[in-house]
Image (tube, helix red, strand yellow):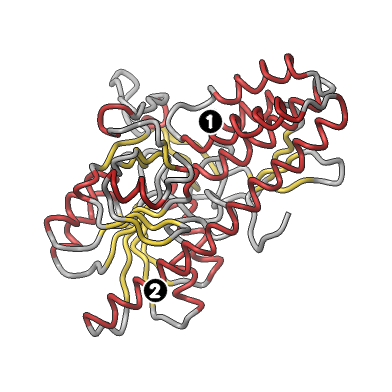
Amino acid sequence: MQGTYRALWLNSDKYLVVLDQRVLPFEEKTVVLYTAQDAVEAIKNMTVRGAGVIGNVAGFGVYLASRQTDGELKALRLLAEDIRDSRPTAVNLMWAVDRMLHLATVSKLEGQLLTDLLLEEAIRITDEDCQRTEKIAEYGADIIEEIMLSQELDRFNVLTHCNAGWLAIADSGTALAPIYEAKRRGIDIHVWVDETRPRNQGANLTAWELLQAGIEHTVIADNTGGHLMQNNMVDMVITGADRVALNGDSANKIGTYLKALSAEDNDIPFYIALPSSTFDFTMHNGLDDIPIEIRSENEVKYMRGLDSEGEVQEFQIIQSESSALNYGFDVTPARLITGLLTERGLCDVNTQSISTMFKDLI
């Protein structure tokens, strides 16, 4: 597999190694996935997360299923369906499993020949994501330059929510890809990083990525973004997505909708960055159709961090008797999105524009 950055790679025995994103930024650990069941568990418990990487792990999970079953298609399919059902919102997961199963079916191969073919396809899926992120980076950085020129800005402030960098989509990510490219072009760029409760993917993952890249950033509480926008401290909001419907309605980490509302009220451009594999062309209205995952209330009740002795600990932050509700995602209506930033360029946020740009995929 090619690429500068990877949240996953193959070891010498051709098993899948992934960065354990649950323990960042205080620890850096890896987990080896040997079976389809390992892939399911890694996706469910968020050892890996981010729409693209979930799809990549799902693709390799089907390869591991073939390896487990000695390339017997019926048994492989049963394991693949478990992978497909591991999380409900991120469509890249279903897309990758379906692509792998389609190839397995039409190839008419079995045994080691099928396993080898599926390994090649899983690698191809991940490498294609890398190529897409390169294009998203270029198009997004072009937009940043255009805004800076039109507003005569010397410095550019971006606000982002959750994590959509290379930990989420191999090589440069989606929402962070234009930021990395802007930095390479010599643009003076600063990122406001939403903490992204309850799992703190912004504070734990995005901030960690930006620190590695030497990009200036500031972590903020999730409720701070609106205030920053009111006070002319944000030039653009850009996030990733986990599923985008044909009409442009976009599901992303819970809290994204609130940022879009604030951006709309303060006339600040709000972009969603995504590869074409994140579209769900079967869904015509995201607000009505996109399933929203409800996760364990313990993610709200507990936080992980360093204690006063510098040891990593898990802390309970609300009383045990209080219940908690933990929606994983919300849907931002198309009307609040300035544009969809894809590997094919900037797409207007409506059914006709999406259908025209991606007519070969529908």
Sequence-wise, the earlier of marks 1 and 2 is 1
Local secondary structure at mark 1: helix
Pointer 1: residues within 10 angstroms few (<14), some, or many (20+)? Answer: many
Q: Nearer the viewer, residue 275 or 226?
A: 275
Q: Residue at x 71, y 41 (%)?
A: 121
Q: Which residue is mark 1?
A: 94
Across and down, in percent, residue 349 comes to: 27, 50
The quarter of the image holding the C terminus is top left
Above-or-below relation of 74 to 58: above
Amino acid carrying mark 1 in the image: Met
Q: Residue at x 23, y 56 (%)?
A: 225
Q: Where on the picture, by quarter, is residue 158?
A: bottom left
Local secondary structure at mark 2: helix
Q: Residue at x 30, y 85 (%)?
A: 154
Above-or-below relation of 113 to 190: above
Across and down, in percent, residue 40 comes to: 61, 26
Amino acid carrying mark 2 in the image: Asp
Q: Residue at x 37, y 33 (%)?
A: 328
Q: Which residue is mark 2?
A: 142
Above-or-below relation of 142 to 56: below
The reply to whether callout 1 and callout 2 are in contact (CB within 8 Å) is: no
Across and down, in percent, residue 256 comes to: 29, 46
